[in-house]
Amino acid sequence: MELNVDLEREIPVLDWSRHLSERVEYMQSSAIRELLKLTQQQGLISFAGGLPAAEFFPLREIEEACRYIVRHEGAKALQYSPSEGHPPLREYLATSMHKYGVPAVPDNVLLTNGSQQALDLIGKLFIDPGDYVITESPTYLGAIQAWVAYQARFKTVGMDDDGMLVDEIEEAYKQVVAETGKSPKFIYALPNFHNPAGTTMPLERRQRLAEIADKLDLPVIEDDPYGMLRYEGEDITPICTFIPERTIYLGTFSKTLTPGLRLGWIVCPEVLVKRFVQAKQGCDLHTGTFVQYIAADICQRGLLKAHVRRLREAYRERRDTMLDALTEFWPDGSSWTRPQGGMFLWARVPEPINTEEFLKDAVAEGVAYVPGVHFYPNRDGGYHAMRLNFSYSPPHLIVEGIRRLGAALKRALEQQ
Amino acid sequence: MELNVDLEREIPVLDWSRHLSERVEYMQSSAIRELLKLTQQQGLISFAGGLPAAEFFPLREIEEACRYIVRHEGAKALQYSPSEGHPPLREYLATSMHKYGVPAVPDNVLLTNGSQQALDLIGKLFIDPGDYVITESPTYLGAIQAWVAYQARFKTVGMDDDGMLVDEIEEAYKQVVAETGKSPKFIYALPNFHNPAGTTMPLERRQRLAEIADKLDLPVIEDDPYGMLRYEGEDITPICTFIPERTIYLGTFSKTLTPGLRLGWIVCPEVLVKRFVQAKQGCDLHTGTFVQYIAADICQRGLLKAHVRRLREAYRERRDTMLDALTEFWPDGSSWTRPQGGMFLWARVPEPINTEEFLKDAVAEGVAYVPGVHFYPNRDGGYHAMRLNFSYSPPHLIVEGIRRLGAALKRALEQQ
């Protein structure tokens, strides 16, 4: 190719803002993603990210799956594939969801490019600019980020140590209707091992939430990324079991298999799967074929279950280590949730300390966390709280990180 | 888990339409995807899909890449990774884009979940409901589908055998401004081996388009999925080379490596990469880590170039086979483009025949194609045209399919 332009010339910088859509004003770079950059700082003990522990990734199983798939499934594992998902994987998920208590058949299952894509597709299908959605407060950062891009507004309900205060939903609903003349679009709930709160909703509260959703004619988004990672007690029936006709259940392989495959799934009524498929075709045609074959292979051989058993033991130990270290090292007046599973706990520090301001002290001590306020969609709480991840760091670093945070907290209190 | 509900009970079907967003009314299931279902009919010769030939997929190279990555890169190839993309892959793409004539550094490159995701992200960043975008007519179906979901309107300009009639752009711009009081959001162009038209824009027309975009202060989306698949002549300088400050260039591995990895990329100004990253974080956090490692491994070993050389030979033979068969079997009054590369040609049939109606005759003969009207965003043309894919079927089936279509066309003409 003969070039008639100088590639090394200085290229002008345009002001793109005048070309952009209105919704761009509402977007912001994820606080978590920006914080993750902190965690790449050499030697930092990070309780900030939501990362699973890389040392447990089932590498051998994945290598074997790749070899088997390329040799025995061949080219079809690398070709375009259905927007709904790889049929054997839909089938596996329907069966395993059914065992979990959700009445699902393969036609109720849609594979997504990680659970985050499910949140984006929900935004696309449901949210018009200015619509309200009802969430817990605090709630999952990725959901806030997905839905602000659709110009959603957030009406929040509080939480206690048993999760969402579901009896506040009706008042939230009434406020939205009074303000806008329209119903909120849905209720978003994380019943198991809440991110960031670490709480789990008891059965009675789930049933009550289902009744309220039915009464108010509201869809429910049940986000359950950590459901498989329970460290004590028995599984509790999902909300979806009671009201499958109005629930969109979200699952993911990111916390069990590995996040780098980017594989999540939606379980919802078949009429709605068709809508999600239309939206997904415009978004990315379909979820990666090869990674779906990998997940299907590992699931079908029963390797995922065995792997999850190992993970539960390792993460239980890390949770217990963190809880013990908190008791030992943190100042009086601190408190924290005691999660039955998942990856996070929610810690409250004595009131004079603002966790957003305290973060720089923590990083100076070589420890990172996410300040609580980021999980409040309307930034109206969480000033004295933080989210602590216990899945990523090995036990000795958990002890060291919690010890350093405790010492820094005590110093900060003395200086008040 | 003790269940207190009957999973086998009959589940009511809700009317979800009252909960959905306005934009859902604009979405529709991709005609192409629906047509792809046709191609799964046993024994059908399909010229309908946009599928690469699976028999050339570099399976051995992919198997080796998987083994190498799992053993030598280990867990980080399966962990969460940056939204911008895997750094070595950004670097490889920047270098190869630079060789191709585009002034790019790694910070100009963003990896996407297939090129379709780039189209969706563009919609998210640029299109407010009712905004116009300027496209060729016919244009790529996936772009139409991505942008109708953002409630875009389409102002189209015509094409001849040298692609987009760029001198119509200014008139289209004026019409949009007169109607809406606002500028259209961008110009979308496929300069190489156009899908569906099979045309290639000569250098002078690209330069002219760049001048017009500059004059009208319009961004340009340069979609180039097939650029590597040239079967004759020399590469022509991309539009991006002339106006990198206002061009968003889209590339993909789907047509060269394999589609099932779902890997595409954007090259654009760094200020805009930051905006795309914000949008992508809300959509799916990041593109799959593992598949990016696979692509990087294959690219860095120089295996992609060798593979593309083989593909070019195979696809050139298929293109020539289809062109020869059209000459031999199709009725007088038919015509077609002669693509210099890519996967498609655009065939016009004698006027009495409507290609949308004729499709059922073709399928009855065991042959599928996509009727031309689907590529017209405003459905105002293409009634007597069809898109024919020549990359997917082996040569003997191309001859047979074109022969059958020719015979059916002749019969249809006799019945008029």
Image (spheres, coloured by chain):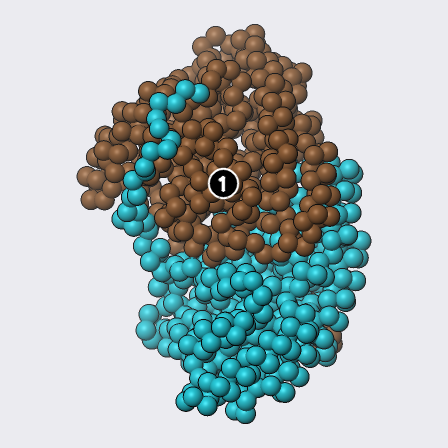
Chain colours: A cyan, B brown
| Image position, residue B245 (x, y; %) | 33, 39
Q: What's the residue at 63%, 39% (across, down)?
A: B297
* Image mark 1: chain: B
Question: Looking at the rendering, in which quadrant would you find the N terminus of chain B?
Answer: bottom right
Most foreground residue, A293 or B214: B214
Query: Taking B351 as reference, is A128 above or below it?
Result: below
Please, which residue is most extreme toward the bottom here?
A: A332
Would you identify the image quadrant in which residue A148 lies?
Answer: bottom left
Q: Callout 1, which amino acid? A: Trp
Between residue B415 and residue B272, name the one nearer to us: B272
- Residue that carries the numbered disc 1 in the rendered image: B265
Q: Quadrant of residue A200?
A: bottom right
Residue B146 visible: no
- Picture layout, residue A373 above or below residue A99: below
Using the rendered view, name the quadrant where residue B203 is placed.
top left
Depth check: A394 or B353 in front?
Answer: A394
Specify whether A48 is left or right of B248. Answer: right
Where residue B148 appears, as percent x and y from the top left, is 40, 44
What residue appears at the point 64 percent right and 31 percent down from the top-left corner? Answer: B303
Residue at 49% from the left image edge and 35% from the top image edge: B95
Query: Of helix, strand and loop, which one carries label 1?
Result: strand
**Residue visible at 73% across and 66% down in the picture:** A311
Q: In this orientation, which residue lies closer to the viewer: B93 or A285? A: B93
Residue A297 position in % (x across, y down): 75, 49
Q: Image height check: is A384 above or below B371? A: below
